[in-house]
Image (cartoon, rainbow, N blue to C red):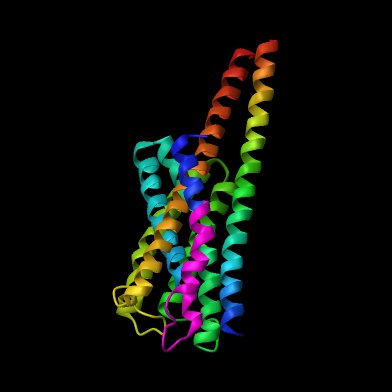
């Protein structure tokens, strides 16, 4: 393995991991927000 | 979005666009050559693994001994970040070792204790997800064991004979490297604060959701 491949691999892995994590948190937040909106609608109806 | 969080996010994004140029311009280390530059993001990731673990343990202690919900929320947010930055440490380190040592892994004190710490934090998340009714207490107890390992990870290179560079590397950096290193460390720490704040917000949304559901069920019982 060459130094430049190692550096690019390490840097690439870190940013991919952070990006995947940010997307995962955003999706979870959206899901909770949807559930909250749904519950609010049910409360308003009743 | 909170203005402080927005400013931190923008600063983070700008910083991380610029940091590769700073790293590329940093002096090349004489014995290891270009591969030493992995150090500028490997060390900040390792620091964030330790910070997240300690912060998770502080929140867990608050939850275990005072029943603090906020402590528990901080603990789970930190635990996820410990797993994230631990994975980054455990990938970037062996990539550096592959070039510098000729092999990616050896079972020495620093590498083994770091892997163990990361596995304990993965265990925290697994216990929390699949631990049943006592999941939160079980995972909080696990966080205390992880916190006991964190100082061992740090001192391992100074106490045991190990192939990993010692903690004296940072104070002995040349002035040209020092500036790049501290800038990178600061940016990674800022990124941690942004991610932690957002993840904590998710946990608080979940807590509000649970309360709303309980209130709704009570009203319709």
Counting every numbered tag in the picture gives 0
The answer to which of A26 and B25 lies nearer the viewer is: B25
- The kind of secondary structure the magenta stretch mainly shows is helix
Report the residue at 54% width, 59% height from top: B17
In magenta stretch: residue B213: no
Residue B42: tell me if it is visible. no
Q: Residue furthest top?
A: A46
Report the residue at 57% width, 23% height from top: B212
The answer to which of B27 and B107 lies nearer the viewer is: B27
| Image quadrant in which you'd find residue A45 | top right
List x then y, in percent, for residue B216: 61, 18
Q: With respect to residue B43, does A42 lie above or below?
A: above
The region drawn magenta spans: B13-37
List x then y, in percent, for residue B68: 39, 36
Report the residue at 63% width, 48% height from top: A24
List x then y, in percent, for residue B196: 47, 46
The answer to which of B137 and B174 lies nearer the viewer is: B174
Residue B4: tell me if it is visible. yes
Q: With respect to residue B7, does B124 lie above or below?
A: below
| Image quadrant in which you'd find residue B169 | bottom left
B64 horizontally vs B38: left or right: left
In magenta stretch: residue B17: yes
Quadrant of the frame with the C terminus of chain B: top right
List x then y, in percent, for residue B158: 31, 78
């Amino acid at each position: 393995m060459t130094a430049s491949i190692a550096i690019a691999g390490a840097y690439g892995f870190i940013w991919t991991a952070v990006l995947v994590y940010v997307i995962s948190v955003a999706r979870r937040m959206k899901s909770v927000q949807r559930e909250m909106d749904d519950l609010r609608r049910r409360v308003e109806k009743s | 979005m909170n203005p402080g969080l927005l400013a931190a996010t923008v600063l983070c994004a700008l910083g991380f666009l610029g940091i590769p140029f700073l790293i590329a311009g940093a002096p090349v280390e004489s014995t290891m050559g270009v591969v030493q530059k992995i150090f500028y993001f490997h060390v900040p990731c390792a620091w964030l693994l330790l910070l997240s673990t300690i912060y998770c343990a502080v929140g867990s202690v608050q939850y275990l001994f005072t029943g603090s919900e906020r402590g528990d929320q901080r603990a789970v947010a930190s635990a996820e970040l410990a797993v994230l930055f631990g994975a980054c440490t455990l990938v970037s380190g062996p990539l550096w070792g592959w070039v510098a040592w000729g092999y990616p892994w050896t079972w020495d004190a620093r590498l083994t204790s770091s892997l163990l710490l990361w596995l304990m934090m993965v265990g925290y998340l697994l216990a929390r997800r699949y631990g049943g009714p006592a999941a939160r207490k079980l995972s909080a107890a696990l966080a205390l064991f992880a916190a006991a390992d964190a100082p061992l990870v740090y001192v391992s290179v100074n106490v045991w004979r190990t192939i990993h560079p010692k903690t004296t590397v940072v104070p002995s950096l040349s002035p040209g490297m020092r500036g790049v290193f501290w800038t990178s460390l600061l940016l990674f720490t800022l990124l941690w604060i942004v991610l932690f704040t957002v993840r904590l917000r998710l946990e608080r949304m979940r807590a509000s959701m649970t309360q709303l559901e309980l209130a709704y069920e009570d009203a319709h019982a």
